[in-house]
Each structure stands twice: as structure tokens, then as C-alpha cells.
Image: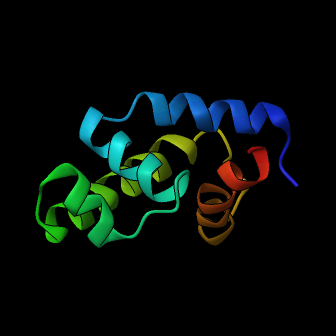
Amino acid sequence: ALSSAASDVYKRQIDELPEKCRLVFLMSREEGLKTKEIAEILSVQESTVRVQMKIAIEKLVARLKPSFPNISFSLLLMFIFNVIYRSA
């Protein structure tokens, strides 16, 4: 398992995401909302939600990889998708 320090780094990186990306990412990962639900709440197209989610994940991976150079890409993605649920 990754340490609480790693979780703190992750949360800081989320805070640094562009506003729309951060909002979509957190609505999906923290609140468990589906793409359609997020689109309805934000009054945007589902494709916009998907694009913002893709941007958020790409930015998180790019920003986290230097902090965790020995972690595989797959493990890093697992961390991105699971850390919020474990810390809730």
C-alpha cells in the first residue's frame, strides 16, 4: 500500500488541476457520479465530461510519475482510481 505521504502528494496534484478537470474528476471519483449525471449537473455534453476526465487523468499521471518513478503505469492508475475511496 502507498503511504499517507503519497496520498498527500496525490491530493495536492488534484488541487492543482484546472478547475473544470478537477470538478469532473472529483464528481466522478469522490461522489461516484456517472458521466451522464455529471453532464446533467454541469449542463454540458457527455463528451465534454469524458474529455475533461481524460485530461485530468493524463495530467495526474504526468505529475505523479516523477514522484513515484519506480511504480508501473498500471499501478499508478490503480492508485489514482482507488486512493480517494480508501481515504474517505
Q: Is 6 on the left-hand or right-hand side of 25?
A: right
In which quadrant of the rendered view does residue 34 lie?
A: bottom left
Residue at image position (83%, 48%) is: 2
Q: Position of residue 43 (x, y in %)?
A: 13, 54
| Placement of the N terminus among the 4 image quadrants | bottom right
Residue at image position (30%, 45%) is: 21
In which quadrant of the rendered view does residue 45 lie?
A: bottom left
What count of labels does the image hold?
A: 0
Name the residue nearer the viewer: 70 or 75: 75
The figure's colour scheme reads rainbow
Q: Is 10 on the left-hand or right-hand side of 34?
A: right
Is 66 placed above or below 44 here? above
Residue at image position (68%, 60%) is: 82
Q: Is 31 on the left-hand or right-hand side of 78?
A: left
Is 9 placed above or below 59 here? above
Residue at image position (34%, 50%) is: 24
| Placement of the C terminus among the 4 image quadrants | top right
Q: Position of residue 50 (x, y in %)?
A: 26, 67
Q: Is 76 on the left-hand or right-hand side of 24?
A: right
Name the residue nearer the viewer: 33 or 13: 33
Q: Position of residue 10 (x, y in %)?
A: 61, 38
In which quadrant of the rendered view does residue 8 lie?
A: top right
Name the residue nearer the viewer: 73 or 27: 27
